[in-house]
Amino acid sequence: MPVSATSSKLIYEALKECDIRLVSALPETWLVHLIRLTDEDPGMILVRLAKEEEGVGVSAGAHFAGVKSAMLMQNHGFLASINGIVSFAHLYKIPLLMLISYRGSIGERDPWQTQGGNVTEPLLRALGIPYFFLDGLETVKRQIRQAQTLAESSLQPVALLLTRALMWEEQ
Amino acid sequence: MLRVDCLRSVYSELENCFVVTIMGAVAAELHSLGHRPNFFYLQHAMGLASSTGLGLALCLPEQTVIIFDGDGSLLMNLGSLSTMARYRPKKLVHVVFDNESLLSVGGFPTATSTGTDLEGIARSSGIPRVTTVRSVESFKTAVTDAVKANELTTIIAKVEAKGPVAYVTDLSLLENRFQFRRHIQSLKAR
């Protein structure tokens, strides 16, 4: 499977360097290596969710406990989390670091991903969620660190869109 | 059985726990008994009180965390039972007040009024200890036992669909949230 192991490892190292100690996740193709790395790390709490919105509550609980967390999800998982984001993270000023695989965008071959791709950025903008693209190996670590800093200082969700360019190694 | 009487019966036991409640009547009634800095009332985001309690319990495994959930909220996030069961924090107590009603919005019946069995769902989700109680006395015993049990417990408390006179408290949402976190951090610093 041409999911980039190199990029996944770099992203995971960046999360560790940010002192992230809890990761919630729902599997999706582009996230397989990231979830495996999280699962294999005894210093990380992995919470495999039934639905992504649960992750908003789990991250809020971690924040109250003084533990930094991150959420791994597909953009459709972001869509499934919107009420939690608005009526918990925004309402109660909870920092969320959301790493969202940006399916359904340029180069997408799976027809079922394309509608979600269309609405991801408009919805992030409508919700007032700052978002940034992870698209190059040389900038990944800095961007994750800076996104985490912004989430903590602004006490709000911040989204990082994992792009095809970073996550998928074309055959 | 009234929910407020259940809450009153265990109020003194909550002092050394971290407590997360759902919105509406549960929040207002616990608050009316006397707010404490270890109480967090999730006044929206229905369904996520249990997820919040799970996040707390996973990060603070030595602390007792009590969730006061409701049938309407839990039905919105049944997957949470499977996630809690998967990680089963030993000191997490999940109380579900089942009044078979979405009381805070006018008393519309939920699916538990037509036979949906939350005890059965919790058990089948893999929650190791599950019980249903119908009296204040048995409620108090169930909560006290669960706190001592050192095993994830879900308690379904069948209560009347009667709520408080007022739902809005004088505690602002953000004040509650910052106070709760600061309280936890101050305990960790000791």
Image: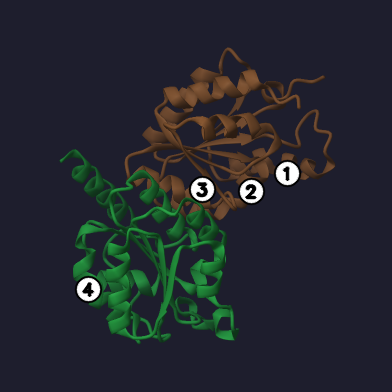
Chain colours: A brown, B green
Alpha carbon separation for disc pair 2 and 3: 13 Å
Rounded to the nearest angstrom, the CA distance separating label 3 from label 4 is 31 Å
Q: Are there few (<14), some (14-19), or many (20+) residues within 10 Å of tag 4? A: few
Residue A106 in view of the camera: yes
**Label 2 sits on residue:** A79
Same chain for the residues at labels 2 and 4, yes or no? Answer: no
Q: Respond whether the residues carrying marks 1 and 2 are from the same subunit.
A: yes
The answer for how far apart the CA atoms under marks 4 and 1 are is: 46 Å
**Residue A57, x across and y down, in percent:** 46, 51
Task: State the image quarter where residue A106 is shown.
Answer: top right
Q: Residues within 10 Å of mark 2 (few under 14, many from 20)?
A: some
Q: Amino acid at mark 4?
A: Leu
Q: Vertically, is B117 above or below B94?
A: below
Do the residues under discs 1 and 2 have CB atoms within 8 angstroms? yes
Q: Which residue is mark 3?
A: A55
Q: Amino acid at mark 3?
A: Gly
Q: Is residue B102 left or right of residue A124?
A: left
Name the residue that disc number 4 marks. B33
- Residue B156 x, y percent position in the rendering: 43, 75
Residue occupied by mark 1? A116
